[in-house]
Image: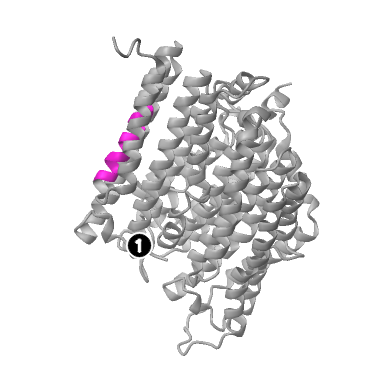
């Protein structure tokens, strides 16, 4: 095997990479739907790290934390999509570029 | 018996009850919802001042603690709720359209979250409590659905809040990976007397970024002015005072007295906090100076105030913690009346632009005087309450020997006078606009503004009251144990 044994470090690196992808998506993408998907990716990156920590540390607590995170993410999406629908009704668009009425 | 009626439980019950009344009760009762909301929030505030309300149910004790900090901050959040409920009951969506019941019921839920946060002693509890606050606030910020700015505020708050959650959860994951626990006291034991664990350092950095969004510290501040301006004014007040204080409670618990304050970790983070503080104070002050919209001006001034508090936290020792507690109370006492005034101004004129203040000093002498006193208190002029707390921040920096930070803080404290003197100048020295509105402020505003203005003066002359509050917040003895013994 080239990589040798898979360790906690590998999982953390992968989750860090996913986190960066999500962060880039939030900061760079214009479509609000994709921004919200990227937010989900951020939370899922954290979930991966939590599960890996549970496995390698032999403690069950992080797995419980994952359930909390999933539940909260679902609530956040529900509210987010509701706001998005309201925005779409008003502006017929969900692109961040159409939201610049508040500027310095 | 009383242990089942902690403020959190009562707040949740009251919120659910108000929603039920709003959807089920006949019209005759539904019109009384503002009164019901105001009375129940006042009742919970009074109850939270009784010592027996601080006893937590035994099954909560591994996640929550009832200590000095929570005893000082639960009334803080409940006072915010009372004022915000009062503002919300006056708020109108259109000229004659009253807000619906949810707008008055919804603020109870983030307040429950904030009270839980004030006594959380485990990151899992912190996470759930913070999300309860954030998700309710997304809804509240976007509540004015016919107004594009309000929806924009909601979605901006959602994206930034989601980002902050992401950082926080990632930090929690790294804490598990490094220390195997997220309980504050166990973290302290894990980290005590050894070199800083690299995973714990990464976790602390991620968590600091997550909190940075909440308190609107540079470089995580960009959402604040837009959201404050777009959101309905009662929600702006909630965001500016209660939600900001939530971030500072976490900073106090972690970087003030908790595991991240230990020398091995603190040696990395004190310079970071000082740098963040300098950047936040500078940007907040300089960006606030040219603002013409009052809510936007308050957003930047809030960023500057957050910077002062972060600077106080960046100094070593317990002095910084007490200073932040006193500063937050002084900030609450000065900025809530200012926002109340702005809410009434918006009701009269339909916007919060500074030009509506033209000649206000002659037209409405009473409210204008109170508004001026509160603004001067925010500016930190003696003899108002903003002065001793700002002085305490500077004294902390002086004692810690942080000369560059001290110099920047002094310059910005002086430059900050300009922020608050501009609206005062407009009120008293600017000529009145051609069209003077026929409508006047309601009579209650005169008394409320004068009373709070005088309260700011009185507390400024009696700073020992704030000192006593700060000492009380440092009392680490869990009140639960104390009462049980």
Foreground residue, B77 or B163? B163
Residue extending furthest toward the front: A2
Q: Percent x, y for residue A95?
A: 24, 54
Above or below for B170 versus B42: above
Q: Is residue B110 magenta?
A: no
- What residue is drawn where x is 45% and y is 56%? B32
Foreground residue, B415 or B330? B415
Res A48 visible: yes
Q: Residues within 10 Å of mark 1 (few under 14, many from 20)?
A: many
Q: Percent x, y for residue B306?
A: 59, 52
Residue that badge 1 annotates: B149
Residue B190 placement, left or right of B343: right
Residue B379 placement, left or right of B96: right
Q: Percent x, y for residue B187?
A: 59, 23
Give the magenta range. Answer: A34-47
Quadrant assignment, res B93: bottom left
Quarter of the picture containing the C terminus of chain B is top right
Above or below for B242 versus A3: below
Residue B381 placement, left or right of B303: right
Residue B385 placement, left or right of B43: right
Foreground residue, B362 or B298? B298
Q: Is residue A45 magenta?
A: yes
Secondary structure beneath disc 1? helix
């Amino acid at each position: 095997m080239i990589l040798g044994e898979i360790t906690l470090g590998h999982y953390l690196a992968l989750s860090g990479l996913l986190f960066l992808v999500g962060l880039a998506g939030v900061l760079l993408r214009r479509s609000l739907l994709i921004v919200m998907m990227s937010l989900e990716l951020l939370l899922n990156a954290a979930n991966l790290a939590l599960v890996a920590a549970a496995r390698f540390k032999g403690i069950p607590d992080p797995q419980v934390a994952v359930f909390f995170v999933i539940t909260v993410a679902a609530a956040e999406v529900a509210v987010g999509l509701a706001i998005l629908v309201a925005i779409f009704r008003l502006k017929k668009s969900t692109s961040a570029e159409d939201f610049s009425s508040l500027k310095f | 018996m009383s242990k089942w009626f902690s403020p959190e439980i009562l707040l949740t019950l009251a919120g659910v009850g108000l929603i039920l009344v709003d959807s089920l009760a006949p019209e005759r009762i539904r019109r009384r919802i503002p009164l019901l909301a105001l009375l129940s929030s006042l009742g919970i505030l009074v109850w939270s001042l009784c010592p027996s309300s601080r006893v937590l149910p035994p099954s909560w004790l591994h996640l929550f603690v009832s200590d000095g900090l929570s005893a000082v901050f639960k009334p803080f959040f409940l006072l915010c709720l009372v004022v915000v409920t009062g503002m919300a009951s006056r708020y109108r969506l259109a000229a004659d359209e009253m807000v619906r019941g949810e707008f008055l019921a919804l603020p109870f839920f983030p307040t429950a979250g904030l009270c839980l946060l004030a006594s959380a002693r485990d990151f899992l509890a912190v996470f759930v409590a913070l999300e309860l606050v954030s998700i309710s606030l997304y809804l509240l910020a976007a509540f004015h659905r016919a107004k594009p700015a309000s929806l924009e505020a909601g979605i901006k708050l959602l994206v930034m809040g989601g980002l902050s959650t992401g950082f926080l959860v990632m930090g929690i994951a790294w804490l598990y990976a490094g220390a195997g626990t997220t309980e504050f006291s166990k973290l302290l034991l894990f980290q005590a007397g050894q070199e800083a664990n690299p995973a714990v350092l990464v976790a602390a950095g991620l968590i600091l970024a997550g909190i940075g969004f909440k308190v609107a510290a540079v470089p995580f501040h960009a959402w604040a002015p837009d959201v404050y301006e777009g959101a309905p004014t009662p929600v702006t007040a909630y965001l500016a005072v209660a939600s900001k204080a939530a971030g500072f409670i976490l900073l106090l618990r972690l970087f003030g007295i908790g595991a991240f304050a230990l020398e091995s970790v603190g040696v990395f983070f004190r310079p970071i906090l000082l740098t963040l503080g300098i950047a936040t104070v500078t940007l907040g002050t300089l960006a606030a100076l040219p603002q013409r919209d009052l809510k936007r001006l308050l957003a930047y001034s809030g960023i500057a105030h957050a910077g002062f508090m972060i600077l106080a936290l960046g100094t070593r020792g317990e002095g910084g913690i007490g200073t932040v507690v006193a500063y937050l109370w002084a900030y609450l006492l000065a900025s809530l009346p200012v926002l109340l005034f702005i809410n009434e101004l918006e009701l009269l004129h339909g916007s919060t632009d500074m030009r509506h203040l033209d000649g206000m000093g002659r037209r409405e002498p009473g409210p204008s005087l109170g508004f001026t006193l509160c603004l001067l208190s925010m500016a930190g002029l003696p003899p108002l309450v903003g002065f001793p707390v700002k002085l305490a921040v500077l004294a902390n920096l002086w004692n810690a020997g942080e000369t560059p930070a001290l110099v920047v803080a002094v310059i910005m404290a002086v430059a900050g006078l300009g922020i608050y003197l501009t609206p005062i100048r407009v009120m008293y020295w600017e000529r009145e606009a051609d069209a003077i509105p026929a409508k006047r402020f309601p009579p209650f505003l005169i008394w409320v503004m004068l009373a709070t203005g005088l309260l700011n003066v009185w507390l400024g002359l009696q700073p020992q009251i704030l000192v006593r509050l700060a000492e009380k917040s440092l009392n680490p003895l869990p009140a639960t144990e104390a009462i049980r013994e």
